[in-house]
Amino acid sequence: MSTENKQYTVSIYTENNIGLLNRISAIFQRRHMNIESLNTSPSEIDGVSRFTIVVNITESQMKKIQGQIEKQVEVIKAFYHTEEEIIYQESCIFKMRSNLLFDERQIQNIIKESNARIVTVNRDFFVIEKSGRKEEIDLLHRELTVFGIMQFTRSGRIAVTKDEMKISTMLKALQH
Amino acid sequence: MKETQTIQNKTKATETTERISGSEAVIKCLLAESVEILYGYPGGAIMPVYDELYKYQDKIHHVLSRHEQGAAHAAQGYARISGKVGVAMATSGPGATNLITGIADAQIDSTPLVCITGQVGSHLLGSDAFQETDIVGISTPVTKWNIQVTKAAQIPEAFAKAFYIAKSGRPGPVLIDITKDAQFEEFDFKYEKCKGVRSYKPVPDTDENSLKAAAELINNAKKPLIVWGQGIILGKAEEEFKAVIEKAGIPSAWTILGASAIPTSHPLNVGMVGMHGNYAPNVLTNECDVLIAIGMRFDDRVTGNLETYAKQAKIVHFEIDPAEVDKNVQTDVAVLGDAKASLKSLLPLLNENSHSAWHQKFKDLYTIEYDKVIKNDLHPTKEGLTMGEVLKEINLQTKGEAAIVSDVGQHQMIACRYAEFNKTKSNITSGGLGTMGFALPAAIGAKMAAPDREVVMIAGDGGYQMNIQELGTIFQQKVPVKIVVLNNEFLGMVRQWQQLFFDKRYASTEMVNPDFVAIAKGYSIEAQKVTERKDLKAAVKEMIDCEGPYFLEVRVEKEGNVFPMIPTGASVSDIRLE
Ligand SMILES: Cc1ncc(C[n+]2csc(CCOP(=O)(O)OP(=O)(O)O)c2C)c(N)n1
């Protein structure tokens, strides 16, 4: 097994219960692992939540973490994937001064070329939203930094796998 | 989030309901789970439940400990000897945090506990109210599961689920935190035991192929070695285990928590592995060709340096908890599942064998250990009583029938090395957390769970004083435990390390002790102190013959050391005999 750090996206299907975020993040914390990104949301199954966590660790560490996560009573199943096995998006929002939109022609080009979207414009500021891969967002961030960004925020990763996960079948089997 | 979603226990409601308060429901839940005894300490946030207990005192016995840590350890002792779930209860804030050491101990030693804590009223949650602590947050890393209940109606499901989770699969502690308003609130009570939790599979399926692969490795082994752990005891697999080792003729060694699963005198029992384990099984771990681990988790105290641990051997691991497989030691074959069922299915696949040449190696190394260590521990000729000879005397007089509850330190290693066990579930000690102060309260719980058994507690002068207040519990409850303190006037185990690895700089390990006998007598516990070898036998006899609780202090040599020893980071085969 490779001893190199790799980026893994972990998908965890769980019961929708209070306190689980604490339990899951503690598993990473105890081993001194930094979580790059974390998102929790409903999943395709009613009442089942899905965590998407991005970490940079070795595969053997990843396997052990997967075991520890699945051991939690309220976790239905945990999967981990390499970058090639998933399709993912992140989302970000920039707030910029409104005058830039009119004074700097370049900005309009950047917005167009990056497939970003203007969410709102008012007298003082305008807001751009962009979803995409991490590098695309990084690039947009670099390009806009030159003009001065008033506020910037970025979401956790959300991902789906190319392969099927068979959670519904699994749940059926677990049903008592 | 809807509150009803916080518990997803797939149980069906029964037809009959009655309108009662949340606190009465707590008692009814305990009764429904056949709880007869619980250990605890009252306080503001749990008073409604205590008030109900008053009403139910003929049905459920509450033991007032003298510190919540004592309550948690007593519940552990109860659980360890009975195989049932231990129950401990405390108030919010300091009461709840005092339980934490016991909960952490139970978690790492896989002991089934249900801990109940009171909590401030739900309208006060998160406001730093008087005696409010986030006990659910604090206990999360050391519980198998926990929950905060803010509505009385959630109580039955929370308890049903708690008991189910605590005792199923790999057991562990759970905590239920109940707000004070939920204790007062009335609701229509109905209780149904939990039969399953959707996201939780306590026992993984056993794969036929892995069993066959394991059998093949075992059958082809020339030098097989079994290391078993508490999984045999927790899985009630003692008989199946004995059948397997006897058929295949495999030398078998134990981890500290595996002790007593088969009798000490069993010819295939080759002793303890690990830091202060026996010489032969440690050395031969690095010589065996197949290492079969059963219900044990390759703790670092067992393996020493992982880089050099059993590298030559194929590893077979029988394990109920999939997260333990390949965690520390890479296996060749992992047999997931319940030890009892797996060993039963394994038996017919095994060839009969005796491995006599291989056994001889264990005997040869035992002779070396006997001459260098055991003889001096058990039959000392020099001045100063040894811990080993006290153990030997206890063995003789209890005929190996006693349950030994040991604390943490040198005496613990001596107790585990030399205690003779004829019965399973007889070695009660804090293995994973190494909690000083464990033994006295755990012995109370053990004796109350098994009143017909002799329960002998063994502690050092250090650990004894960490929960010495539990003498009050013994006094009040009249628990006839036998308390042995091996007094070396040192925090012995730490002093040993200072001697060996810190140039004898005895920093803060010397103890100036009080008159222990007078203290015991202050609690009306019969007591005696022995300082000379010639008085030992009679003193132990007096203790064993005594019907009530008894305290025996033995002044042992001040600077005795426990050997063999694997220094931290060393290989198991580099075990030192002196
Ligand atoms: C709660 C706790 N604090 C500290 C330790 C560290 N520790 C391990 S063994 C030991 C010394 C134990 O001394 P004593 O109880 O007198 O027993 P002895 O080793 O002399 O038999 C200490 C301090 C511990 N295990 N638990």
Image (cartoon, coloured by chain):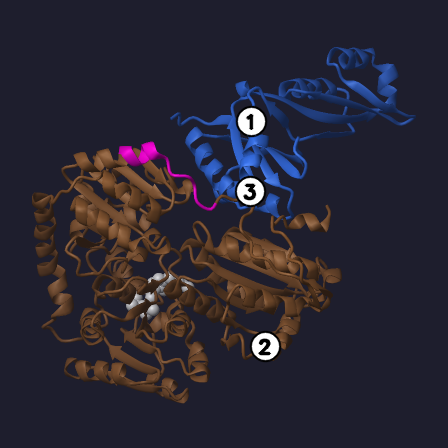
Would you say the beta carbon of the disc 3 residue lies within 8 angstroms of ligand 1? Answer: no
Q: Which chain is mark 1 on?
A: A
- Residue at the image point whose x is 70% and y is 18% from the top: A140
Q: Nearer the viewer, residue B70 or B209?
A: B209
**Chain coloured blue in this rendering:** A
Q: Colour of chain B?
A: brown
Of the four image quadrants, the one with ligand 1 is bottom left
Q: Amino acid at mark 3?
A: Ser
Q: Position of residue B508 (x, y in %)?
A: 36, 67
Q: Nearer the viewer, residue B544 or B199?
A: B199
Q: Position of residue B108 (x, y in %)?
A: 42, 54
Q: Position of residue B121 (x, y in %)?
A: 72, 64
Q: Amino acid at mark 1?
A: Met
Q: Quadrant of residue B477?
A: bottom left
Q: Is residue A58 above or below residue B382?
A: above
- List the residue tagged with mark 1: A165
Q: Is residue B110 left or right of residue A10?
A: left
Q: Is residue B351 above or below residue B153?
A: above
Crowd tier of the residue under label 3, counting other residues whose Cα lies within 10 Å: few below 14, some 14–19, many 20 or above: many
In magenta, the rendered stretch is B202-213
